[in-house]
Structure formats: C-alpha cells, structure tokens
Image: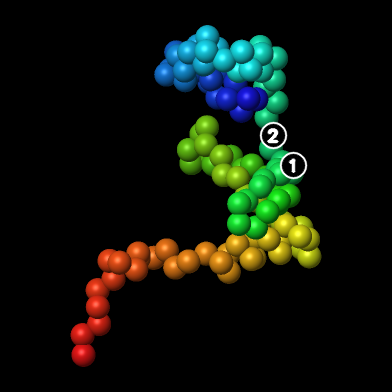
Amino acid sequence: MALLRAEAGRDPHDRLSHLVGELSTRSETFRTRWAAHNVRAHRSGVKHFHHPAVGDLDLTFEAMELSADPGLSLLAYSAEPGSASQDGLLAGLAATPDLEQPADTRTPHRT
C-alpha cells in the first residue's frame, strides 16, 4: 500500500488516482489501509515469499534508481548464502523447464 500511495502521489491526475477512488468505494479493507497514509519508501530490506513449487523464501532486496529513466527502479533480490531460501531458489531453477521454445512448436530434425 505504501508503494501504491507513493506512486499515486507522483501524478495525482493520472488513471491511478481514478483506480484508487474506485477501490476506496468498493473495499473497506482498501479504504482503511489507504487512509493510514503509509508512504515509506522501502529501499532495502527482506521480503517473504511463498513459491508454490519450492516453499517459503526470505530474500534480501535493494532498490536502485535508474538514472537514465527517472522514476523507475531496479530491484535486486538475493538469498543468504547457505540458507534454506538459497536452496529453494536453486531447486526452483533446476526444476524450471526449457522455456526457449514450447515442445509442440519445435521444428522436427530432418535427416
């Protein structure tokens, strides 16, 4: 919610403001959280994720501003070396199928 509020504040007349207004009228939970005025910018910290294939992951992150494109940030995530999160990430990478080209569209080899 903090990031949404910070982004909405950049240009109060864009479409995001209209979306916030619509969500505020339809959701008590959204309205309550929006009213909290939480606008902290999180530049670094730890995020907790649950990946359906590898389980819970605790990843350290750092946000880096892109000087060539003001307003955009690059987020880098990493797992503590030797941690269960690192093991989970490596297991997830090992289990990822070849995504370069779907199997059903590959051209058969001719001999």
**Residue found at x 68% / y 29%:** 41
On the image, which quarter does residue 78 sit in?
Answer: bottom right
Residue 51 visible at all: yes
For label 2, the SS is: loop
Q: Is residue 105 left or right of residue 82?
A: left
Instruction: Identify which residue, 8 or 98, lies in the foreground.
Output: 98
**Residue found at x 78% / y 65%:** 82
| Residues under numbered marks 1 and 2 in contact, where contact means CB atoms less than 8 Å apart | yes
Residue 61 visible at all: no
Residue 36's spot in the image, x, y percent?
70, 14
Instruction: Identify which residue, 85 or 68, lies in the foreground.
Output: 85
Number of residues whose C-alpha sits closer than 10 Å to that of mark 1, classed few (under 14), some (14–19) or many (20 or more): few
**Would you name the residue on which mark 1 appears?**
45
**Residue found at x 60% / y 62%:** 92
Colour setup of the view: rainbow
Residues at marks 1 and 2, CA–CA distance in whole angstroms: 7 Å
**Identity, as a three-letter code, of the amino acid under mark 1:** Gly
Instruction: Identify which residue, 66 or 53, lies in the foreground.
Output: 53
**Identity, as a three-letter code, of the amino acid under mark 2:** His
Where does the N terminus fall, quadrant-wise?
A: top right
Residue 42's spot in the image, x, y percent?
69, 34
**Residue found at x 60% / y 18%:** 30
| Residue that lies at the very extreme toward the bottom in this rendered image | 111
Residue 49's spot in the image, x, y percent?
67, 46
**Would you name the residue on which mark 2 appears?**
42
On the image, which quarter does residue 111 sit in?
Answer: bottom left
Question: Is 56 located above or below residue 25 in the figure?
Answer: below
Instruction: Identify which residue, 73 or 21, lies in the foreground.
Output: 21
Q: Is residue 42 left or right of residue 97?
A: right
| Residue that lies at the very extreme toward the right in this rendered image | 82
For label 1, the SS is: strand
Q: Is residue 60 left or right of residue 107?
A: right
